[in-house]
Structure formats: structure tokens, C-alpha cells
Image: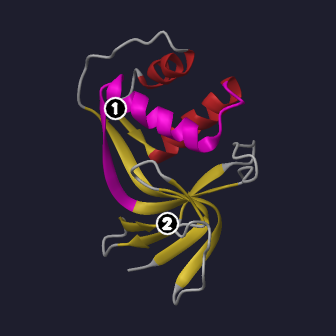
Amino acid sequence: MRKYAANYVLSTSGEFLKNGIIITGEDGSAAQFVDTKGDLREIAQLTFLNGILMAGTLFVKTNTATHNSDQPFESLVIRSVSEFTQFSITETIDLAKKVQLQFPEIKIPEILNRITTTLQTLAGFSMEITPGIYLLSGADLVNLHFTPKSKLKKIL
């Protein structure tokens, strides 16, 4: 079991936790998310990382029927994933950066949550939690926007 904290943690349920903690299971997957309510205190064996932490996820196509949307955001997501049968966390971040360019007013938490919702409700994907903890670094953590330097790195 390992403990990681970061400026922000995105839980698998879509919660965006300021100074949150991820506790991993034996297989390296996220076992627990701790909401510190922004008040992170020193804890034994806690590793702090600068950026946004997230658990490993994989979207798997389970339904061939895709629902069209007249909403520009959702349409962009559906078009971007139309040829995929699986969609990894790395591909999700790449898509999120593309979406940020088209919708600069939307912040990272909303972009990621809307992509997840669109994949699951309109594009025929289901989400699986996979082993691994990832760090999104190089993002603008004040305004919560992707930057050209934003990159995803597997840390566990």
C-alpha cells in the first residue's frame, strides 16, 4: 500500500479533490481517495507530487450504437472516439487537451467529467479501473487549464 498526494486528485467517481490523497491497493490500483478538504497534513510515508493525480482507467466499447448529439462538446468527443474499441487514460488526456483548444473557457475537471460522461452515455463505452496511478504535470493549476507543456506520466 502506498500513499500519494498532489495539488489535486481526480477520483474515479469524478470528484476533484484539492490536496487529495490516493491510497493504492496491493495491485497498484487506487483503493481509496481521501478528501482533505484542502487541508493536507503530514502523514507517514505520504509522497507529495506537483500536479493532478488520477487512477488508471480504460474505456472499452461495449455498445456499437452511438448516439449523436447536437451539442458541440459531445459531438467533438463522439467523432474523436468513433474508430476506437478501447480508449486509455493517455488517450483521454490527449482528447481533453484537444477539447481545451476548442473550448478554452472550460476547466480541466469539467472537461474530464464531460468526456467520461459522453463516452459512457453517448459513445457506447464502459469504464474499467486499471492498475496504475498517473500524474498530470505542466497544467495551469491556478486556472485549471491544460498548457502546451501538460503531460501525463505513470508513477505507479
- Determine the residue positioned at 62% across, 73% down: 39
Q: Assign a secondary structure to mark 2.
A: loop
Q: How many marks?
A: 2
Placement of 48 over or under 57, stated as above or below: below
**Disc sitting over residue 120 in the figure:** 1
**Disc sitting over residue 35 in the figure:** 2
- Determine the residue positioned at 52% across, 67% down: 155
The residue carrying pointer 2 sits among few (fewer than 14), some (14 to 19) or many (20 or more) residues within 10 Å by Cα, namely some
Query: What is the quadrant of residue 19 in the picture?
Result: bottom right
The residue carrying pointer 1 sits among few (fewer than 14), some (14 to 19) or many (20 or more) residues within 10 Å by Cα, namely some
Q: Is 132 on the left-hand or right-hand side of 27?
A: right
Placement of 121 over or under 138, stated as above or below: above
Report x, y in % for residue 133.
46, 63
Dot 1 and dot 2 residues touching (CB under 8 Å): no
What span is colored magenta in the figure?
Answer: 103-131
Circle nearer the viewer, 1 or 2 = 2
Q: In the rendered view, how is the structure colored?
A: secondary structure
Along the line of sight, the residue nearer the viewer: 124 or 111: 111
Report x, y in % for residue 114.
49, 33
Q: Amino acid at mark 2?
A: Asp
User: Is residue 12 inside the magenta stretch?
Assistant: no
- Determine the residue positioned at 56% across, 71% down: 5
Question: For the N terminus, which image quadrant?
Answer: bottom left
**Label whose residue precedes the other's in the sequence (1 or 2):** 2
Q: Amino acid at mark 1?
A: Gln
Q: Assign a secondary structure to mark 1.
A: helix
Query: What is the quadrant of residue 9 in the picture?
Result: bottom right
User: Is residue 122 inside the magenta stretch?
Assistant: yes
Q: CA distance from mark 1 to mark 2?
A: 25 Å
Report x, y in % for residue 139.
71, 50
